[in-house]
Image: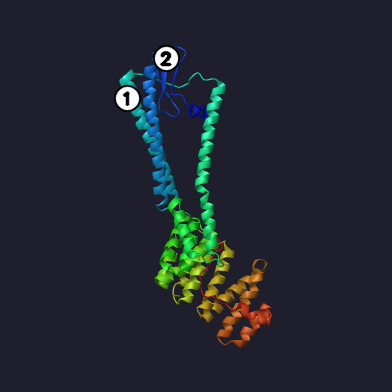
Amino acid sequence: MFKKYIKILSNPLLYYKDKEGNSVFRNFSPVKKTGNLYNVDFSKSQVGKALEFRFGLDKKLKLANFLITVLLYIIFIHVKYSIWGLLFFAALWIGMLAGVRYYCATIYKDFLLKNYGAYRLVEFEPPVSKRKSAEFVALFRSKIILTVLALIIFFAPTFLLSFGIKHCLTPKHNGYKHAVTLSNIYNAIYPKSAKIYDMRAAAHFMMRDYDKSLDDYVKAIELSGRRFTKRDYVRFENLLLVKKKVASSQEAVDAFDKYLSKKRMSVLQKSQMLWVKSIFKIENSIIESILQEYDELLASLKAKDTKNQFYISCDRAYMLYLMQQYQRAIDSYDELIQYADENQQTFAKELQSLYAERGWAKARLGDTDGANLDFKTSDIPTEKLGEYEPSYIKQAFVREKF
């Protein structure tokens, strides 16, 4: 079937006489009933008149197809990207091409009826040798190859522009203005790319244009779709920082929650992003809902998911220490140490850090003996105990390696 359609589409002939002497004109149908048959042997002038009219319609059809393609492409690259949007434009493109072809078919039909009368629909199968047919197919394939090459040539600069932006963003060059210029050129010519917005967001941040940096991060997050990717870790961390600079810490958290809620995430990814947000909240003294969010995440887990329950509970205890709620942290560490001790096959390695963290919480409350006992039980060298005290690094802009 596929070969048949290729044979039909590759055939450039528009008219022939069959064995009975009937005249058959090719219509605009692409695959079925492609011929209009007349039980008449038309003169050369009559055939020439029809073919001349048909050639004129073909030129207009090709021009219309080109303009529709260019117009929809320009509109597509300047609207908010989504899979549904892509499918919509693809369907619209096919529909508009089909509509123009149908319009030309109607005009040609009216021309034939007016000048030659009624016809009968048949398959357009001119008496062409196998050799000639093979030449038509080869020429058709060549056109397809040339079209593909033209598309490759058109999109090849995307790699050069992307490399140029990346090159400008390296600390060695600091060509942030050039990076923005190249990004703008890319967005003006090619479909939107989350990576390009990521790079432009970084450039705008380094130029201290925080409003535009924020807009770029939002667009990058939206363009990246529902699936949570490795690059989203950096996007959301920087989103918190940039939003805080243009608004407030609470508004930064609200934006973080808003866009994160649109992502599909695993339990591990949820816990990692909750960690990022909680550290940000502690740093900015908005700690009231941290424990509630950890409790909600724990409540969402399946009863048999003991590993995630344990590790998320460890994070929760860590946050209690950072929130300076040392007694509650000790109570949590008591439960975690007991559970890990009872399940040493799975959690033996975690016992060392749990003892050390509980020791630091006891030390903060002045329980020196209890702290020293935990430090000793942890079996951590004295000079390295400081590495195990719960702490956080003040948030800074994450310069991603593109």
**Amino acid identity at mark 2:** Asn
Location of mark 1 (residue): 110
Q: Name the quarter where the C terminus is drawn.
A: bottom right
Q: Which mark is residue 377?
A: none
Residue nearer the viewer, 397 or 126:
126
Residue located 58% across and 76% down the image: 333
Tell me the CA gap for discs 1 and 2.
20 Å
- Furthest-left residue in this view: 114
The vertical placement of 136 against 179, above or below, is: above
Q: Which mark is residue 22?
A: 2
**Amino acid identity at mark 1:** Asp
Residue located 43% across and 68% down the image: 210
Residue located 66% across and 69% down the image: 344
Circle 1 packing at 10 Å, graded few (<14), some (14-19), many (20+), is: some
Where residue 146 appears, as percent x and y from the top left, is 52, 38
Question: Circle 2 sits in a helix, a strand or a loop, which is it?
Answer: loop
Where residue 30 appears, as percent x and y from the top left, is 44, 29
Q: Is residue 165 visible?
A: yes
Circle 2 packing at 10 Å, graded few (<14), some (14-19), many (20+), is: some
Residue nearer the viewer, 354 or 323:
323
The vertical placement of 266 against 43, above or below, is: below
